[in-house]
Image: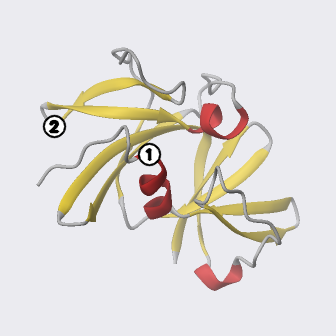
Amino acid sequence: MLMLLFYSGEDRFACTCEHIVEIIPPIKLKPIHHMPEYVSGSIIYGGKPLPIIDWCQMIRGTPCHFSFHTRMILFRISAQDKIYEFGMMAEMVTKTMNVPKEAFVGSGVFIKEAPFLGGVLTDERGSIQFVEVEKLLDSIQTVICGIA
């Protein structure tokens, strides 16, 4: 399965590419007030506002560092008879890899605050944690509205 590799600091993560619409360089965000800190703001995409979450803020509590490899990953997910669209800013969004989802094995822990963190794959550079985008959507659905 085709997976996108991205980082938060030195930690590596991967998600399947099935819900990815586009990957774009960071652009200026319009602030959205009264939101959790991990909601960085919104952009206009396809003529409508698209909320952007900050992966690093969500995972480590500090915002993404803007560098040449920082990107916004734009997702579209159909769930519960609605379409959800949102973006996620992450660091070092530079590679894809082709591995079966089953190659990620259980991490041995369940983090109640981050149920979207799945199994772990180990390679010569260390571990890569799988991010279940559908469960990520479940975690942020209180701030992301779907379109019927």
Give the secondary structure at mark 2. Answer: loop
At label 2, which amino acid type do we have?
Gly
Whether residue 142 sits left or right of residue 61 in the image: it is left
> Where is 67 relative to 127, above or below?
above
Q: Give the labeled residue for mark 2.
A: 46
- For the C terminus, the quadrant is bottom left
Give the x, y percent position of residue 146: 22, 49
- Classify mark 2: residues with Cα within 10 Å, few (<14), some (14-19) or many (20+): few
Whether residue 103 sits left or right of residue 55 in the image: it is right
Colour pattern: secondary structure
Give the x, y percent position of residue 69: 59, 34
- Classify mark 1: residues with Cα within 10 Å, few (<14), some (14-19) or many (20+): some
Residue shown at 19%/59% (left/top)? 82
Residue shown at 63%/24% (left/top)? 63
Give the secondary structure at mark 1. Answer: helix
Q: Give the labeled residue for mark 1.
A: 140
- The earlier-in-sequence mark between 2 and 1 is 2
Residue shown at 63%/53% (left/top)? 114
Residue shown at 82%/62% (left/top)? 127
Q: How far apart are marks 2 and 1 (CA)?
A: 22 Å
> Where is 139 relative to 44, above or below?
below
At label 1, which amino acid type do we have?
Ile
